[in-house]
Amino acid sequence: MKPMNPEQADKVAHGPGFVAALDQSGGSTPKALRRYGIPDDAYSGDVQMFDLVHQMRTRIITSPSFDGGRIIATILFEDTMDRDIDGRPSAEYLWSVKNIVPILKVDKGLAPEQDGAQLMKPIPGLDDLLSRAAGMGIFGTKMRSLITMPGKGIDAVIDQQFAVAQQILDAGLVPIIEPEVDIHSPAKAAAEEQLTSSIIDRLGTLAEGRQVMLKLTLPENDGLYSDLVDDPRVMRVLALSGGYTRAEACQRLSRNHGVIASFSRALTEGLTAQQSEHEFDTTLDAAIAEIAAASRT
């Protein structure tokens, strides 16, 4: 088992700033490219698609605005981990050049909805992936489920998330548990209340000294996650943007003290392939500044 990097652990647990999510998968990559100004007919097949999205991610990560003073960690897609940035493996570049902790998305997408929730699909070869990630300098992982309604689906999501989290902890990595609640749910507040209670119950199953991170939807009731923020078994509580605009996501985040951002769409909002380097860096810098400020509350 890989020993945890204490400098990285301290930065993740206590560092100022937020976690950048650059982990769009095969299913969400076309949408990300469209928002970036690259239409579907600009490429053919997965190889060209992943080449283009890696160029986008490289442009973001190598930007002077993308700095370790405001960005604690970055969540990568497996394809990004396996590629280089400026001649170095992506995880090594992030930590050695930018002082940003590398984290890996490990889930394989969502299963069909059942009981108001979507579990993760099976993750074949997870132990091998975790071993390879640890060898490449990855600190932690992220895995996403989706909840639309309160009920027994939430319990199934948390059972699965914590079972896989134990496997990740056994490999020496720190898991980010992400049970997203759909922002369009007609029972969003009730689902968030049940989810929070379920997480608190499951935290009691962790062995002494073990910690997880949580990535949760910005709640309807401000301060809902305060007990999770204060729980010693939780290294950090992150918030996903979930489809909110950056302005609304940051407003909601600023009202939830101790929670920091882990935004994807809200981070890259306004960035396009057609921008000059100056325009791109200026737009990205403004986004990072706004998200970092909301994460300081």
Image (tube, rainbow, N blue to C red):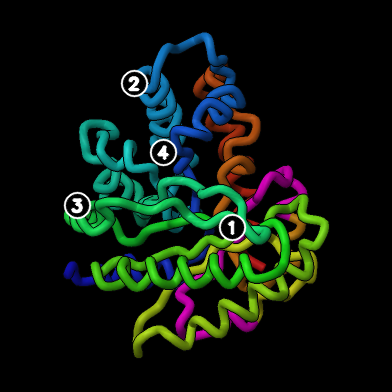
Which residue is labeled 1 in the image?
Answer: 261
Residue flagged by tag 1: what amino acid is it?
Ala
* Screen quadrant of the N terminus: bottom left
Q: Depth-wise, is mark 2 or mark 1 nearer the camera?
A: 2
The Cα–Cα distance between marks 4 and 1, rounded to whole angstroms, is 17 Å
Among numbered discs 4 and 1, the one appearing first in the sequence:
4
Q: Residue 32: x and y, percent?
A: 55, 30
Q: Nearer the viewer, residue 171 or 282?
A: 171
Query: CA–CA distance between discs 2 and 4?
Result: 21 Å
Disc 3 crowd rating (10 Å Cα; few below 14, some 14-19, many 20+) is few
Which residue, as the protein is rendered here, is positioned at the far top? 41
Reading the image, the residue beneath label 3 is 132
Q: Relative to residue 111, is residue 216 drawn left or right? A: right
What segment carries the magenta color? 227-250
The tag earlier along the polypeptide, 4 or 3, is 4
Q: Closer to the camera: disc 2 or disc 4?
A: 2
Residue ID at (32%, 36%) = 79
Furthest residue in direction right, as rendered: 186
* Residue 198 falls in image quadrant: bottom right
- Is the Cβ of the residue at disc 4 closer than 8 Å to that at disc 1? no
